[in-house]
Amino acid sequence: MRKINFRVEFFKEGDVYVGLCPELNVSSFGDSLLESRQSLTEAVEAFLEECERMGTLEDVLEEAGFTLHDGAWC
């Protein structure tokens, strides 16, 4: 899999921290900021792996506004 640079946002909602990757519409949460980050990383990786398995990764990334530059999706 190629390198993919994506934006993440974190915010607190009640007692949990929520992590969001807006371009891919993937989110996750944790009891701490670190847990939220780890959980979001796992969720994004699972999403991208499934897209790759289905053969739709490039289409999904392009539709989300990513472009390929020097071997990396940005």
Image: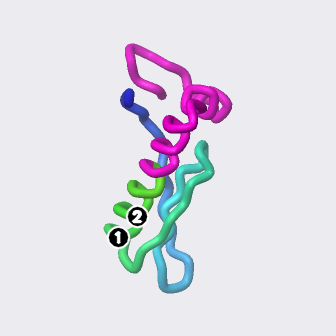
Secondary element at tag 1: helix
Label 1 to label 2: alpha-carbon separation: 6 Å
Residue 18, image x and y in percent?
A: 50, 68
Magenta stretch encompasses residue 11:
no
User: What residue is at 54 percent from the left and 60 percent from the top?
Assistant: 27
Q: Are marks 1 and 2 in contact (CB under 8 Å)?
A: yes
Q: Position of residue 59 (x, y in %)?
A: 63, 28
Q: What residue type is disc 1 on? A: Glu
Task: Give yes or no for residue 72 being in the magenta stretch.
Answer: yes
Q: Which residues are magenta?
A: 45-74
19 or 56, nearer to the observer: 56
How many marks are shown on the rendered structure?
Answer: 2
Which image quarter holds the N terminus? top left
Query: Which residue: 42% across, 74% down?
Result: 30
Residue placed under numbered mark 1 in the picture: 35
Residue at (46% x, 26% y) in the render: 73
Above or below, comparing residue 14 to residue 3 in the picture: below
Q: Amino acid at mark 2?
A: Ser
- Which class describes the residues within 10 Å of circle 2: few (<14), some (14-19), or many (20+)? some
SS for callout 2: helix
Q: Which residue is mark 2?
A: 39
